[in-house]
Amino acid sequence: MLNEIKAKTKERMLKTIQSFHDDMKGVRTGRANASLLDGIVVNIYGGHQKLNQVAGVSAIDNKTLSVKVWDATAIGEVKNAIINANLNLNPVVEGNTIRIVLPDLTQETREKLVKLLHQFSENARVAIRNIRRDVMEEIEEMKKNKEISEDDFHVAKKEIQNITDDNVKKVDDDLSIKEKDILHH
């Protein structure tokens, strides 16, 4: 029973970290990266499609992204979606391809991006701690109902805390790497 709880805890925390990574992908580092456009949704064909479902995105060099739109009639919608994504990008249409030259990041912009990263990391830490709290309540209830012994309770409590600490450290380490990437490029 406790092993199931630990496994479930690890899984939930892993999903939180994955969500944190997804949030970080959308933050520019100063280098062209196709994942920068991952969150863009295009209003097309009477619905909403993710950009990567209507176009291929690739980095040509450190400063330029290329968006190859598969359906030439959709190029205007794709361009508008990129403009409306509030990424401060200026797409230029060249046939079926949209070129995006990334502007250099100013120090002020870098600092804003780092603040945003810290916000994402704090949200992840809070989510991890909430998972810990839920699990701790669950094992305390088990102890109260005599489903587990006092010793098992203390061992489980310590293991859950270790899992929590490891995941919070992972968030902090990943934040540090991304922060350095932004500030030093």
Image (tube, rainbow, N blue to C red):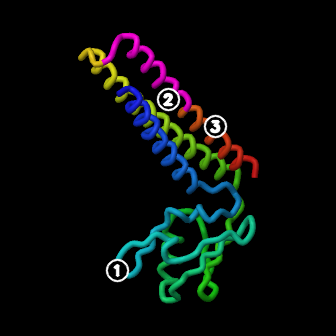
Q: Compute the Cα span from label 1 to label 3.
A: 42 Å
Q: Compute the Cα span from label 2 to label 3.
A: 14 Å
Q: Quadrant of the N terminus?
A: top left
**Residue type, numbered disc 3:** Asp
Indicate which label's residue lies in the foreground, 2 or 3. 2
Q: Secondary structure at mark 3?
A: helix
Q: Residue at x 53, y 40 (%)?
A: 121
Residue bearing mark 3 = 173
Q: Secondary structure at mark 1?
A: loop
- Earlier along the polypeptide chain: callout 2 or callout 3? 2
Q: Position of residue 150 (x, y in %)?
A: 36, 10
Q: Secondary structure at mark 2?
A: helix
Residue bearing mark 2 = 164
Q: Characterize the magenta stretch by its predominant secondary structure.
A: helix
- Earlier along the polypeptide chain: callout 1 or callout 3? 1
Residue bearing mark 1 = 46
**What segment is highlighted magenta in the picture?**
148-166
**Residue type, numbered disc 1:** Gly
Q: Is residue 49 left or right of residue 83?
A: left
Q: Residue at x 75, y 52 (%)?
A: 185
Dividing the picture into quadrants, the one containing residue 180 is top right
**Is residue 101 placed above or below 71 in the rendered structure?**
above
Q: Compute the Cα span from label 2 to label 1.
A: 44 Å
Q: Is residue 40 left or right of residue 183?
A: left
Residue 83 falls within the magenta-colored stretch? no
**Residue type, numbered disc 2:** Thr
Q: Position of residue 10 (x, y in %)?
A: 46, 36
Dividing the picture into quadrants, the one containing residue 31 is bottom right
Q: Position of residue 148 (x, y in %)?
A: 32, 17
